[in-house]
Amino acid sequence: MQHSIVCACDNVYNCWSNKTVPKNMQPAEECESFLSNEIKELLLIEQNYHEKTSSFSGNGETVNWLMVETFFDGKAVKHNQPLPYEYCRALTPRLHHLLEYLPKVSFSAEQLAWTNRLDLLSLIFDPTSAEQALTNVLLLTSITEYALGNLFKTETGISPPHLLRDLLMTEPLTGVLGETPIFLLRLLVGTPHGINLRNLLWHGFPRKNEINPLYANALLLFLISSGEIIERKKCKITHRVYPENLGALVQRMDLPQFDESSFEVFLDSQHWQHILQLYRKGHFYQCVCLALPHLEMCLRRLYGTLYDVDYRAKIDEYYIIMDTIFSQIDPLGARNKVFDHFSTSLMELVYDLLTAVNGPRLRDKISHGEVELNQINRSIASATLLSAQLLLTADRRFSYKSKFHPNSVCRGRIKECEKAVDLISTITIPTNLAGLSVDHMEDIPFLPSNELPVEVSIFYRPPNEEEIVGILTRICTVLKTASKNLYESLTTRLGALENRQLRSRARNTLENMLRMYSTINRGLDFVLRLTRWIFYCLMKSEALGDDAIILRFLKFILKYTENAASNLHTKSNTWQPLYETTKRELFVKGRQNLALLLC
């Protein structure tokens, strides 16, 4: 029996036609907490610390860090020292009290310019609003991570650590901002043994009422105070630039438009209702920021049900995250049950949208602060909500094939190569020169005739297949260039010959090229057919042969195509080395290795 992600999921699927929501449609996540008792103790601010303390205000809307240091009474640890759970737990009442008495701040463009994220900060109009608190903290954790990464790169000239907790333990940040600001930030977002707001929220654990607006205020105050420190030290921040390609990547997925009316069956869920309202109002960035973590939480509940495990957040144990949910092998070493719950099309959709290295990787890029406000448009929000709808209903009618998996990319490159190689056959050689192009060498290795597979498999593949496919893809990319170079080189010279623009020396060069043309053309065609055949065999096999031999042979083929692309360039007059390599090595090595390959 299939488990549903939300209550009465099958009923949701059946009621689309009449838009009637069953009475038992209220999702379970509306009335339960996904936080363990340990996390709740650290996160929920009870406002029961009775020690009287004056405000920790500095000049304007900044922090008096000396007062903060004194308040912790020597209990603060250095930036490069660990923060164990028992330490964080013991310090929790004092931390909560500090958050209550920090100065209340508002948006300050001048002091926040150093973050290079004024576009996102402009969305945080009221950091003390309970309604906005969860969204604000989501945005602020990503902004903080991105801004501190820029500061680290400015100080060191190298890329920052990928994990925020590792970034906060580096010397360069402490050297600029000081030990106390970094210590406070580590308590909030920088250790898996503490509150760890960044991970909690971006993995979708807290409910809206579990995030106190004091957290948003503290993060915004940290950014403003850091801006004041950076300005005082006259530090010029180098901002990392990320390519604006998300929209184009999502468009390549060619997904149908999200249908708002079919999504309304989820409106008994207040969280999805709020997300849909954001979409309708054109607040696409906030819509996607809230939808992705909440979708992950829904999927985590499914995973927990399938494996009968606790899916709540625990100290230093966020083990059921998106990577785990969609890992092909489960913790027991068997096939992941999630792959049986969903259709292959849905799994390929999730892979392309969230996981593929060359795909949009929406959640990863947004959560690390690498996406500007205007990059998240209606098309991206539509793709996100469509994916959520399909997953929440486990829709098996939806059809999709990956565009970004290495196997899919390789298939596309082979098709491009076929067009480039076929173009060579359209070259018309004058009849008075045709005899020069005849090469009677017919000793070309036999390859079975085959077509590209209509569909390629991307899950549960042999372990070394990706490396082989990667080389095949590079071969195709270079072969396409080599074929175009051959076409342009010959057509340019033949055009000049027809217009009587070739001197005798250039004419002799052309005649020499034409003597070698047939062999070189056959060599390029052989590489194309070989690549297509090996790819075909890979897709039809469940295990590889001797992958060391395959890789060694393919590296030789790659080197051959690289030389071909160089030798056949329009500015090159020397085809002889390529001609000799084709006759003496390409066909010979091809014949020697074919019997040892896959089919």
Image: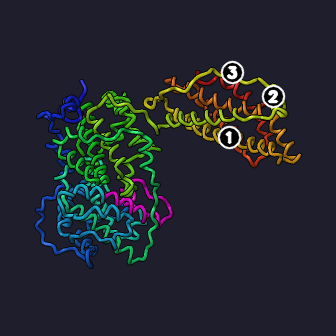
Residue 245 vertical placement versus 145 (above, below): above
Q: Main secondary structure of the magenta part?
A: helix
| Residue 482 circle label | 1
| Position in image of residue 515 (x %, y %) | 82, 34
Res 190 seen here: yes
- Horizontally, is 74 left or right of 540 in the view? left
Residue at 28 percent of width and 50 percent of height: 287
Front: mark 2 or 3? 2
Residue density around tag 2, few if under 14, some if 14–19, many if 20 or more, within 10 Å: few
Magenta residues span: 140-169
- Horizontally, is 8 left or right of 481 in the view? left
| Position in image of residue 406 (x %, y %) | 50, 37
Q: Disc 2 designates what residue?
A: 439
| Position in image of residue 145 (x %, y %) | 36, 59
Residue at 29 percent of width and 31 percent of height: 395
| Position in image of residue 507 (x %, y %) | 85, 43
Give the distance between the C-alpha atoms of the residues marked 1 and 3, in whole angstroms: 23 Å
Q: Disc 3 designates what residue?
A: 446
Along the line of sight, which residue is nearer the eye, 85 or 295?
295
Res 35 seen here: no
Amino acid identity at mark 1: Ala
Secondary structure state at the residue bearing disc 2:
loop
